[in-house]
Image (spheres, rainbow, N blue to C red):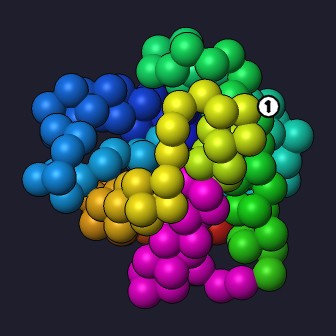
Amino acid sequence: MISLIIMIISLILDGILSNFLPYNDLSLFTPLLTIVSIFLIYPFYKKKETNYFITIAILGIIYDLFYTNLLFFNAALFLIIGYITKIIYKNLEISVIKLIIYLITIITIYELATAAIIFIFNLVPITMTKVIYKITHSLLLNIIYGEVVYIILKILPKKYKKMNIN
């Protein structure tokens, strides 16, 4: 239940912040809160990984319907991010400090994969400068959001969560 709330809030905040934060040279914030939530909700699905991948695929389709015109584009990217998240959680320890590194990695991979697909299919003109700009300007807001949600999840009473956060 908590994971669904996190995903819905992230999805809505992505839309709201995209409307209020300009995407130009003055913007320091590019919201990718749904990507952050994909990383943070994995512990809810540790024993039911199939449900995790189904959930993030559905989330990707919903994201595509609301924010892009490319059906299944983000669904596929969310599945890739979900698989990388699974590897990180299974092999590495998650802490408040290490979360920053993992979120930087996840956001960078998402942006590079998006840019690669856009470049391969020649959807819009894209340069490496634009990709680096988007990565650097998406880190601050998303790391702050990730840390806040992680800390909230960590202090939640066990009756409201059924997850294992170190």
Q: Quadrant of the C terminus?
A: bottom right
In the picture, the quarter occupied by the N terminus is top right
Position of residue 109 measured from the top left corner of the image (x, y, whole percent): 63, 61
Q: Can residue 39 be spotted in the picture? A: no
* Type of the residue with mark 1: Ile
Residues rendered magenta in the picture: 92-112
- Please tell me which residue is depicted at 35% across the width and 34% down the height of the picture: 14
**Magenta span: chief secondary structure:** helix
Residue beneath disc 1: 54
- The residue sitting at 68% across, 49% down in the picture is 116
Number of numbered discs visible in the structure rendering = 1
- Left or right, 80 with respect to 111, comes to right
> Which one is in front, 27 or 84?
27
Q: Quadrant of residue 10?
A: top left
- Front one among 3 and 99: 99
User: On the image, which quarter does residue 9 sit in?
Assistant: top left
